[in-house]
Image: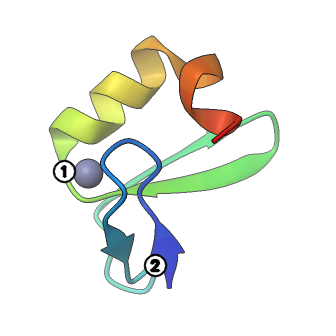
Amino acid sequence: MVRDVVCGMTIDEESAKYKTEFEGNAYYFCSQWCMTEFKANPEKYVKL
Ligand SMILES: [Zn+2]
């Protein structure tokens, strides 16, 4: 399990529909909204 860094939800990476990469790391999201938010401000979330 991985954490959605935008909203804090726990995500099962096996079934995650929303995934992106930033600086070589994979990030998973619960929704299109969270992924869009992350892509808009990745620096804000990767440090958390
Ligand atoms: Zn989310």
Is ligand 1 closer than 8 angstroms to the Cβ of mark 1? yes
Question: Is 7 situated left or right of 21 in this image?
Answer: left
The residue lying at 37 percent from left, 57 percent from top is 8
Is 46 located above or below residue 37 in the figure? below
Among all residues in the image, which is located at the extreme top?
Answer: 40
- Residue 30, quarter of the rendered image: bottom left
Mark 1 vs 2, N-terminal side? 2
Callout 1 environment at 10 Å: few (<14), some (14 to 19), or many (20+)?
some
Three-letter amino acid code at the position of disc 1: Ser
Is 9 located above or below residue 48 in the figure? below
Residue with the mark numbered 2: 13
What is the secondary structure assignment of the residue under circle 1?
loop
Residue 34 x %, y %: 27, 39
Mark 1 vs 2: CB contact within 8 A: no
Task: Give how far apart the Cα atoms at labels 1 and 2 are.
Answer: 13 Å
Is ligand 1 closer than 8 angstroms to the Cβ of mark 2? no
The residue lying at 28 percent from left, 64 percent from top is 17
Residue 47 x %, y %: 71, 35
- Residue 39, quarter of the rendered image: top left
The residue lying at 31 percent from left, 65 percent from top is 9
Residue 20 x %, y %: 51, 44
Callout 2 environment at 10 Å: few (<14), some (14 to 19), or many (20+)?
some
Question: Is 22 situated left or right of 23 in this image?
Answer: left
Residue with the mark numbered 1: 31
Residue 16 x %, y %: 33, 71
Three-letter amino acid code at the position of disc 2: Glu
Quarter of the image where the C terminus is located: top right
- Residue 10, quarter of the rendered image: bottom left
The residue lying at 18 percent from left, 50 percent from top is 31
Among all residues in the image, which is located at the extreme front?
Answer: 48
What is the secondary structure assignment of the residue under circle 2?
loop
